[in-house]
Amino acid sequence: MILQECLRYYKSKFTFLLTVVLSIIIGASYYATYLEKIEWIDVLHSGAKDVNLNKVSEIISGYTGSLYFENFLFSSDYSALAALILLIGFGISIGSNTFKSIQSNYGTMVVTRMSYKNYLKNVLFAQALYMSTYIIGFFFIVFCLTVLFFPGGMQISSSSFVGDLPLIQYLALLLIAIIHLSIYIIVIILITTVSPLFLKNKYIIQLFPFAIVMVTYFIANVLGNVNGDLAFLTSFIVLDNVLFNSIGFFNSSQSTLMIILTSSIFIMISMFVFVYMYKANIKKFGQDYI
């Protein structure tokens, strides 16, 4: 059932639509990076006497395929927007599946073949498999196409966010960032899947992932303006900070423990919330179908 459910998600029109929207966002990011390169080219040819021609030429040659991908993945504007689109897309397409099953009395039929607990477990595994393979696969393809068709290819740019890293560590950093993004999205969507425990409207459930992100921004903006300590604590739950702190493993002066806390504390809290809601969901709806 898990693979069949996963394949059903892949065949959905939302998967195609999500791919198109993400491609547009990445295209916009790449175009913005290209405009930056054009600005440096204009500086190079400006004829200004105070321009360091060697340094500017080095910057221009540093606009390699890997830098275009970095500018997207580690840009707070475009990658955060992509994460939000993923949350909205998955929320709409798969977040309300269990709710619709419950409302249509599908669960009554399910328990004639398996327990509600097994049914829910299979759905959650299928969703996690679908989202993880989609996100990692999508960005892997984008990265490969970028380094294949853009000048400089996989050459690490002198303007790289992470400085001069060995290629293996550099690729490991990109993989960590993408897996980190996947885990963040998967946990929130799985919470959405079991949210019929207290949410009784399909559209509210579908927008629940978006609401979670907006609430974290609201809390951070309100409490963050009270004092520095609250600003520091609430920064742990904001989308941008959660996602971008993974880069700190390679170029941050912060301790490893602090980087782990800032990049994972929200995810860990979300996991605890999910486990509690998962057990409560089984207890409530499992009994309804007995």
Image (cartoon, rainbow, N blue to C red):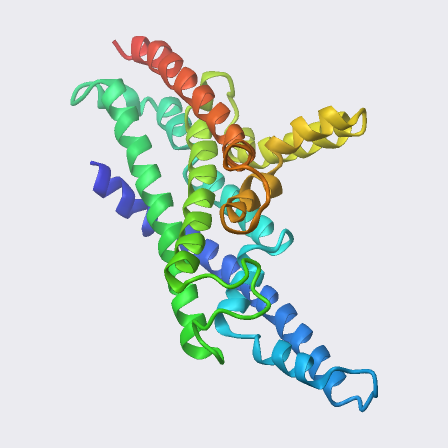
Asked if residue 71 lies left or right of residue 143, the reply is right
Q: Residue furthest left?
A: 113
Location of the N terminus by quadrant is top left
* Observer-nearest of 114 and 172: 172
Q: x, y (%) of residue 50? A: 83, 83
Residue ID at (51%, 21%): 200
Q: Residue furthest right?
A: 49
Residue ID at (39%, 32%): 97
Residue ID at (43%, 59%): 170
Location of the C terminus by quadrant is top left
Res 12 seen here: no
Q: Is residue 15 above or below residue 207?
A: below
* Observer-nearest of 275 and 265: 265
Q: Quadrant of residue 116?
A: top left
Residue ID at (29%, 34%): 125
Q: x, y (%) of residue 201? A: 52, 25
* Observer-nearest of 16 and 289: 16
* Observer-nearest of 25 and 153: 153
